[in-house]
Image (cartoon, coloured by chain):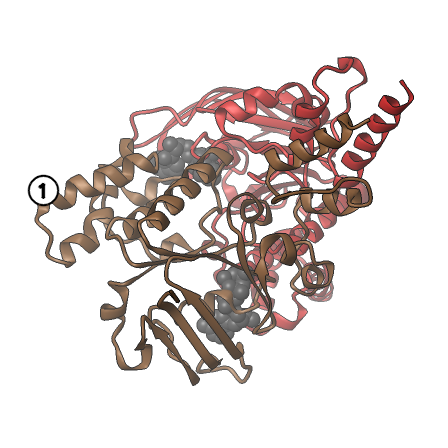
């Protein structure tokens, strides 16, 4: 089943002279885990807003093209609240998303709006608090939280709603590295167990490269690469460096040390362990010859 | 010759007014003038709370903080802010003007600069940070990364002696991070002190040598990045992950003798290549 079909989408914000998105096409199957990256200002957040309906419903501007969810729901014909059970979005600025007076209420709020009954609501709130490791923050107000704590609450409140599509705009930007890894693993788990479709925007790719099944790279309002992580971090490295997108260092070392080997056999190492293995093997081979 | 202390923190204890918990517990810290320092550590460790003491936004409950010898309890934020420029973690807490240019010029106007000079200076900084094309745009129409760069610009512009940045690399692509690193190196050569709060382990591995690590309201480690970031215990305690090349270098240590800062990509590659080519 096709979860998202974006066809010929262009968008220009009101008051802006440039198109933020230029004729973007993207199809995502249900259960895919897609990473979107690209230079600051290239249109990542704008694309996310087209998926959850904030564009064209909330942001004014010139809009062309179609976004269709699950082959029948035309985003432009539904109000964002109607889309809430289908697409959940974690915003780039988590604080703007937090409206309630406590963390617990914040998570319950979205569930109330979905009309979920009390018992189930309580279960889901506990589940989400636990999943993000924020039980100890349950009674705090959003303004009493650190930046990373706010981000965890924003993620928890969207995950609790269990939307069929999760769109996360730089969800780990303010998280410590161990928490980033936790969140990425929680998402993988949800995808496996509930077949949720995940779109995640990030600049730091170390942790995500080995986990996602697709990497979409944008530049100046267009999609310029859409391939598997192996393909992207092996064959598109020069292009990524040129537009200023981060390449995991293990992949860079690999490219620079072994660029003359047989291309067919190359597989970029995404972890330091894999890199070390490749280096040790290369030494063995050169000792033998 | 010993350098002056830019920041001195002595037995600092802090808790927020409506809260019972101590957020900072007996922090002691000295940062010399002309240093570049990274402050890292888990979510909720107290990093933002600590640096808000450096320009007097927060005042110690116990202990003291001195900025170039000035006790922050005896000086106003306005006085301290001239010397200590603070870039907030959340840009929306900082931005308020109606255009990017006005936002950037605000501090200079406040300090009574000639308007033409102020504008020239602001434009120069905005160009450096890739924001020139937005000068007449509303800051609230910028992308996340662009907003962050604007808040950096509006502090850089008045050239404070101490620059304190809370998560400056958030929302930045690799190219922007490199440009930002070049800027902090440049102002550092001019004698400025730079303090960067960040979770971005790879950024620190690439550009910053001196690291302070916090966990649960305390400083748990301080030292050279190659030592601190490659110390498994410290990394676990502060919920950090070792830099990729640090972990690789540790695993290769039995074989390869690394000379120099192996966290830096060119050095790592050079050292491994040398070993691979050894007979
Ligand atoms: N609300 C808005 N009104 C007008 N222009 C906007 C608005 N939001 C973003 N833009 C502009 O649209 C372009 C794309 O912005 P977008 O936020 O989609 O970028 P991004 O890829 O998410 O960047 P970042 O990585 O910095 O978050 C940028 O040039 C930006 O200045
Ligand atoms: N205004 C406040 N009132 C009460 N508690 C607060 C307030 N601001 C922060 N805290 C608490 O103080 C602790 C330290 O917060 P701080 O913002 O300094 O953390 P941090 O190290 O900057 O974390 P992060 O990496 O998530 O930004 C946290 O547990 C947080 O919940
Ligand atoms: Mg964005
Ligand atoms: Mg903080």
Which of the chains is brown? Answer: B
Residue B202 lies, with reference to residue A7, above or below; the image says below
Residue A24 lies, with reference to residue B40, above or below; the image says above
Question: In which quarter of the view is residue B186 placed?
Answer: top left
In what quadrant does ligand 1 lie? top left
From the viewer's perspective, is B126 left or right of A281? left
From the viewer's perspective, is A266 left or right of A72? right
Q: Colour of chain A?
A: red
Q: Residue at x 51, y 47 (%)?
A: A91
Question: In which quarter of the view is residue A27 placed?
Answer: top right
Secondary structure under tag 1 reads: helix
Rendered location of residue B78, percent (x, y):
23, 68
**Is residue B61 in sight in this rendering?**
no
Name the residue nearer the viewer: A125 or A36. Answer: A36
Residue matched to label 1? B116
Q: Residue at x 30, y 44 (%)?
A: B139
Name the residue nearer the viewer: B234 or B13. Answer: B234
Q: Residue at x 37, y 78 (%)?
A: B59
Residue A159 lies, with reference to residue B177, above or below; the image says below
Rendered location of residue B242, percent (x, y):
68, 51
Residue A231 lies, with reference to residue A152, above or below; the image says above
Q: How many marks?
A: 1
């Amino acid at each position: 089943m096709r979860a998202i079909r974006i066809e010929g989408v262009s968008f220009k914000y009101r008051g802006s002279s440039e198109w933020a998105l230029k004729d973007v096409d993207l199809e995502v199957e249900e259960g895919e885990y897609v990473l979107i990256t690209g230079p600051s200002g290239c249109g990542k957040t704008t694309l996310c807003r087209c998926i959850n309906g904030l564009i064209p419903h909330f942001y004014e501007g010139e809009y062309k093209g179609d976004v269709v969810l699950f082959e029948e729901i035309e985003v432009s014909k539904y109000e964002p609240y109607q889309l809430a059970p289908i697409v959940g979005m974690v915003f780039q600025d988590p604080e703007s998303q937090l409206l309630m007076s406590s963390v617990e209420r914040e998570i319950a709020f979205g569930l109330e709006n979905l009309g979920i009954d009390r018992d189930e609501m309580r279960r889901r709130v506990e589940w989400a608090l636990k999943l993000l490791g924020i039980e100890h923050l349950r009674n705090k107000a959003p303004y009493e939280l650190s930046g990373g704590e706010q981000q965890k609450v924003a993620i928890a409140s969207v995950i609790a709603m269990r939307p069929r599509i999760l769109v996360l705009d730089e969800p780990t930007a303010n998280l410590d590295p161990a928490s980033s890894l936790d969140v990425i693993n929680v998402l993988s788990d949800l995808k496996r167990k509930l077949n949720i479709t995940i779109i995640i925007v990030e600049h730091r790719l170390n942790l995500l490269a080995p986990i996602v099944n697709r990497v979409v790279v944008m530049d100046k309002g267009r999609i310029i690469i859409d391939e598997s992580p192996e393909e992207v971090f092996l064959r598109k490295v020069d292009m990524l460096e040129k537009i200023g997108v981060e390449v995991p260092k293990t992949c860079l070392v690999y490219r620079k040390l072994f660029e003359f080997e047989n291309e067919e056999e190359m597989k970029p190492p995404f972890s330091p362990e894999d890199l070390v293995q490749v280096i040790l093997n290369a030494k063995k081979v050169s000792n033998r010859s | 010759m010993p350098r002056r202390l830019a920041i001195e923190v002595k037995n600092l204890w802090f808790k927020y007014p409506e809260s019972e918990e101590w957020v900072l517990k007996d922090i002691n810290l000295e940062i010399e003038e002309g240093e570049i320092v990274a402050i890292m550590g888990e979510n909720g460790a107290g990093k933002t709370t600590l640096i808000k003491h450096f320009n007097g936004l927060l005042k110690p409950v116990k202990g003291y903080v001195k900025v170039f010898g000035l006790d922050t309890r005896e000086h106003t934020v306005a006085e301290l802010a001239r010397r200590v420029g603070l870039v907030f973690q959340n840009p929306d807490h900082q931005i308020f003007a109606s255009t990017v240019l006005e936002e950037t010029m605000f501090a200079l106007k406040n300090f009574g600069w000639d308007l033409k000079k102020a504008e020239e200076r602001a434009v120069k900084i905005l160009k450096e940070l890739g924001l020139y094309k937005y000068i007449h745009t509303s800051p609230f129409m910028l992308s996340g990364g662009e907003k962050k760069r604007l808040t950096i610009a509006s502090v850089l512009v008045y050239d404070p002696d101490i620059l304190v940045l809370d998560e400056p690399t958030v929302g930045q692509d690799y190219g922007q991070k490199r440009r930002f690193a070049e800027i902090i190196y440049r102002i550092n050569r001019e004698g400025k002190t730079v303090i960067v709060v960040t979770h971005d382990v790879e950024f620190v591995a690439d550009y910053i040598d001196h690291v302070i690590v916090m966990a649960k309201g305390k400083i748990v480690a301080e030292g050279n990045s190659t030592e601190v970031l490659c110390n498994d215990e410290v990394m676990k305690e502060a919920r950090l992950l070792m830099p990729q090349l640090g972990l690789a270098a540790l695993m290769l240590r039995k074989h390869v003798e690394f000379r120099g800062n192996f966290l830096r990509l060119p050095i790592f590659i050079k050292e491994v290549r040398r070993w691979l080519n050894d007979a």
